Image: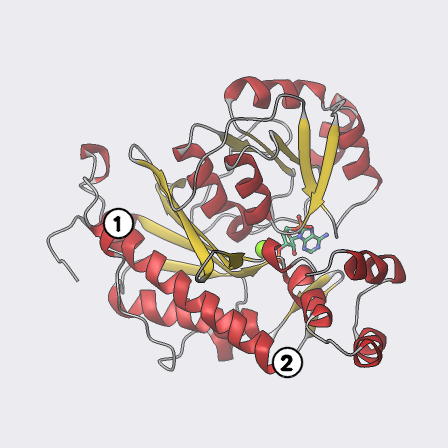
Amino acid sequence: MSQTAPLIVRLLASSVSVANRAGKIVRDIMSKGELGIVEKGKDDYQTEADRSAQRCIIASLSAQYPKVRIIGEEDGNEIQSSHEFLETDADKEILSLECPASLKGIKEEDIVVWVDPLDGTAEYTQGALMLKRDPWERWKMYLTHPFISMKWYLSLLHSKYGFLEHVTVLIGISVNEKPIGGVIHQPYFKNENKMGRTIWGLKDVGVGGFTPGNPPESLIITTTRSHSNPIVENALQVMKAAQVLRVGGAGYKVLQLLEGKASIYVFASPGCKKWDTCAPEAVLNAAGGKLTDVLGNFYKYGASESRPNKTGVLAAVNDELHNYAVQRIPQELKDKLSA
Ligand SMILES: Nc1ncnc2c1ncn2[C@@H]1O[C@H](COP(=O)(O)O)[C@@H](OP(=O)(O)O)[C@H]1O
Ligand SMILES: [Mg+2]
């Protein structure tokens, strides 16, 4: 790897390569069919893909950037690090980027990296069902699946490919508590000749890996499909949207904003964590968008910050739409979430 590129450019280039490798791990585990689902909490699951992808990301980045603090979703003794999946490549396109003066002096000690090895775990595990071609085998798998309701099962059957496109690998780079760089890798994005794509963003540089789209003409909101509740629904109703898209993962929802498929992401619930939003927020910022809580306050990404994004998520493609969304949320709902 070019040691001449500034640290932040090298770290982003490594993160792109590591995310690609983690995406391959995610696909390989799905192909083998042994997902190893563990229930971490209510509506919160982990699979072998989450664990192995995190091992790959943490081992690879910490071997090359030992003083960078790396925090992953799947914290636990046995999955902290492993040299089994070491990835030391760095993306050439990123390495050739011109580093802006504002990012040149950053040191490893200033950086906290937030890792979500598999965002959209619910959609990933449900995708396993769709890979069963034999309807009887699929039904048997459904019966042993820990958290798929009949309604979801039917929506899956109608979706043809399931919701695997919603799955992303997220690596967010923060400096002085602010997200400044991010990688969103989509292992199941279908390209013409290869599977997967990697979107990146860097402060004062821009974004890459996809074609940005203009916001839709009418107001389209994107939100959760698997973690709703009455407060989440209330916040959606007040937006007066022409359409509400219900999709999995924070990464995928921000991708919808970036590609012009939706203009605001609304999630009035404490369920998302720092690893869900750090990379998407960095990429969205680099594209001119904004991500905050539902009160309009920015989250901080220092290592000592609490993990949950307690006051929800509100993101938009530009300041004007973001202001609109913050103003529409009733004070009573804001008070409830911040209590
Ligand atoms: N009520 C809840 N409990 C647990 N996790 C939640 C949650 N609400 C949101 N999340 C987490 O926030 C991310 C985006 O959620 P959603 O797809 O519902 O929008 C998911 O990350 P993971 O899939 O990485 O676990 C999800 O687990
Ligand atoms: Mg997540």
Q: Which residue is mark 1?
A: 94
Q: Residue furthest right?
A: 150
Q: Residue at x 62, y 60 (%)?
A: 164
In the drawing, does residue 33 fall left or right of residue 168?
A: right
- Specify the quadrant of the image occupied by residue 39: bottom right
User: Which x, y percent locates residue 56?
Assistant: 41, 72
Front residue of 271/152: it is: 152
User: Which x, y percent locates residue 324?
Assistant: 63, 18
User: Which x, y percent locates residue 154?
Assistant: 85, 60
Check disc 2: other Cα within 10 Å, few if <14, some if 14-19, many if 20+: few
Where 59 sits versus 339, above or below?
below
Residue 339 visible in the shown view: no
Secondary structure found at label 2: loop
Q: What kind of residue is marked 2?
A: Gly
Nearer the N terminus, badge 1 or badge 2? Answer: 2
* Ligand 2 closer than 8 Å to label 1 CB: no
Q: Residue at x 68, y 45 (%)?
A: 270
In the drawing, does residue 111 fall left or right of residue 225?
A: left
User: Which x, y percent locates residue 94?
Assistant: 26, 49
Residue 61 visible in the shown view: yes
Q: Cα distance, mark 1 to mark 2?
A: 34 Å
Color theme of the render: secondary structure
Secondary structure found at label 1: helix
- Specify the quadrant of the image occupied by residue 269: top right
Q: Which residue is mark 2?
A: 33
| Placement of the C terminus among the 4 image quadrants | top right
